[in-house]
Amino acid sequence: MLYPSLSFDMMDGLRSGLKKTGMDTRCEVVSASIGLAAKNEEIYARCEQVLLDGADVVVAYMNPLSAEYVHALFQSAGKRLVVLDSGYHFPAFQGKLSHAWFLSLQGNLCCRAIMQKAAADGYRNFALSCSFYDAGYRPSYSYTTAAEDKGGTVGLSHITPLRRAEFSLDRLAEYLGDNKDAAMLASFCGDMAEDFFRESSRLELSTTYDTYGAAFTAEEEWLAKIPYPGKDWDAAVPWARSIATPANEEFVSTLEGIRENKANIFSLLGWEAALFIAATETGSPEGIVLDSPRGRVQINPETQFSEAPVYFARVTKNEGTGNCRLTDVRDAGDLQEERRLLQRDIDYIQTTTANSWLNAYACLDS
């Protein structure tokens, strides 16, 4: 599994956040597994059971398609669903779900943000490389439309084979050899990101061409395991340990006090869920603002998805380990135009025939 401690990290973040807000003594937390297969019928059954058992709020890491599937339960029960969302999917519903709120890592917005950075650096020609796993989500689409919006083009969309033993970047190397003015866009996560940077370093792609990655490609826990590819590269991320604010310092200190590397993007979502629950305990979510470790988080009233800062960062060499690390983390600034364009992409996909993964864990061969 890519992130074996995911559920534990979210739960620890939730419990720690509830303790911070003083709600830990006034509420009971119960858990139910919905597995890895994204089977909507199974998710529905689990949600129904916890609601029948008396839950007032259900916090779930699921995609927007599953949230829409189970939403009628929460309407009928008059209860709230807080969805912890990677931001890698596009919702299929228009407007909002009345009883569901989404705390999102904004994966697709991060893609648009780093493309904005690449365009500002002068690039117009891009080679996009994705793992078989990552290519089934929406970042590859977001990268491509963002490039076009900036007057550029993704001249190559390269997807690595399913089987790890067949991993190859030869087609990527061939294209870049013929397009010296191009930059690389990377959409890999976990050990697949390690495969990409190892092979791109071996082929001297990482040292010859500038690389841009987003969200899970630059996730700090995995980055620390990936050998430095020989040249710094740029990323856009939803959060970083080094964000120098009191809210983030408290979060990192609290979670790292449980276990090393416990402060991560998944415990962050759990922590934010606790802040959301506390802020809405006696009132409406309308207009609330969360003082999150990643900055000011507000809920868009038209979609009920969270809107939060995105950060540019530089991936450099950790001299102590020889692996990668995230440095020079800085706010990407106003991304309202990118948010508007992302919503345009979502609206378009809703009007055409398009496929995506519901959950791609079944395809992993690592």
Image (cartoon, rainbow, N blue to C red):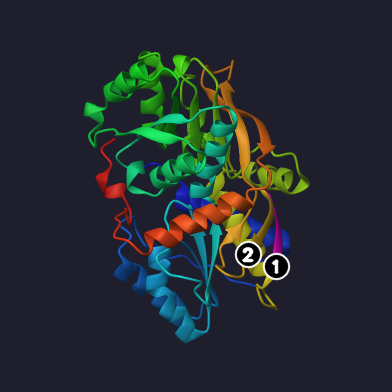
- The residue positioned 37% from the left and 27% from the top of the image is 196
Q: Residue 42's image quarter?
A: bottom left
With respect to residue 293, does 78 lie above or below? below
Q: What element carries label 2?
A: strand
Distance from the alpha carbon under mark 2 to that under mark 1: 7 Å
Q: Mark 2 sits on what residue?
A: 299
Q: Is mark 1 on a helix, strand or loop?
A: loop
- Magenta stretch containing residue 334, yes or no? no
Whichever of labels 2 and 1 marks the residue nearer the N terminus, that label is: 1
* Residue type of the residue flagged with mark 1: Ile
CB contact under 8 Å: marks 2 and 1: yes
Q: Mark 1 packing: few (<14 Cα in 10 Å), some, or many (20+)?
A: some
Q: Looking at the image, which is closer to me, 270 or 211?
A: 211
User: What's drawn in magenta, residue-wise?
Assistant: 289-293
Q: Mark 2 packing: few (<14 Cα in 10 Å), some, or many (20+)?
A: many
Secondary structure predominantly adopted by residues drawn in magenta: strand
* Residue type of the residue flagged with mark 2: Ile
Q: Mark 1 sits on what residue?
A: 288
Q: Residue 39's image quarter?
A: bottom left
- The residue positioned 38% from the left and 66% from the top of the image is 66
